[in-house]
Amino acid sequence: MCTMVGFIDPAVVSANAGTITSRSRIVAGRLQKTDGEQIFMMPYNPGRHWILLIMRAKRETVYFLDPLPGPRVVDEEAKNIVNSALKIYNSHIGRQGRKAPIWKTLSGTSKQPSSVECGYYVMRFMRDIIMDPSLAFEKTFAKGKEEAPYPQEAIDEVRNEWAEFVSLHLEL
């Protein structure tokens, strides 16, 4: 159900894209254009690495997916941006809201085999989520699930789809 999924442009929220305040307002503005039931995927790059944050505004819940192996923590700047955006969203809909959003690390994601595949892995996470009509990503990527790297075919598939998309939108 793609209508239940929204995307936030990583170019306007990742590191060095402006102040935390301005980036929070951009995210909040995106959330305010929906009923809050939609999930929002926000690829984020704190600097030389891609992660995926998924927001459920009405539930005040944020999911953190990181393709790097080992225990991972959410970048503080990303956390501040999203927490502030959810406060702005709550204010916009006239809701008191929680003191702080719930953050859940989904550690059962496939793990990249070296240090260069993170962008493709984040794109693959997003693809897997939107291809599942039940949007059961929380179960799909739960702790204890398979953490092996994606097979090369899965990464090639997302690379090819991305290349096709870009070539359709390039001005020749």
Image: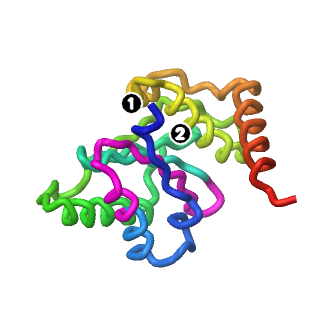
On screen, 18 above or below 69?
below
On screen, 44 above or below 162?
below
Q: Tell me the residue at 47%/36% (across/down).
A: 2
Q: Which residues are magenta?
A: 28-49
The N terminus is located in which quarter? Answer: top left
Magenta stretch contains residue 4? no
SS type, badge 1: helix
Q: Tell me the residue at 44%/41% (across/down).
A: 5
The C terminus is located in which quarter? Answer: bottom right
Q: How would you rate the neighbour count of disc 1 (Cα within 10 Å): few for under 14, some for 14-19, many for 20 or more?
A: some
Q: Which residue is mark 2?
A: 70
Question: Hey, what amino acid is under mark 1?
Answer: Glu
Q: How would you rate the neighbour count of disc 2 (Cα within 10 Å): few for under 14, some for 14-19, many for 20 or more?
A: few
On screen, residue 13 versus residue 59, left or right, reads: right
SS type, badge 2: loop
Nearest-to-viewer mark from 1 and 2: 1
Q: Which residue is mark 1?
A: 138
On screen, residue 121 versus residue 42, left or right, reads: right
Total numbered labels placed on residues in the image? 2
Q: Which mark is residue 13?
A: none
**Residue 40 coordinates in the image, percent (x, y):** 42, 47
Question: Hey, what amino acid is under mark 2?
Answer: Gly
On screen, residue 140 versus residue 16, left or right, reads: left
Would you identify the image quadrant in which residue 86 lies? bottom left
Query: Whole-Å distance between the Cαs marked 1 and 2?
Result: 19 Å
> Which of pointers 1 and 2 lies earlier in the amino acid sequence?
2
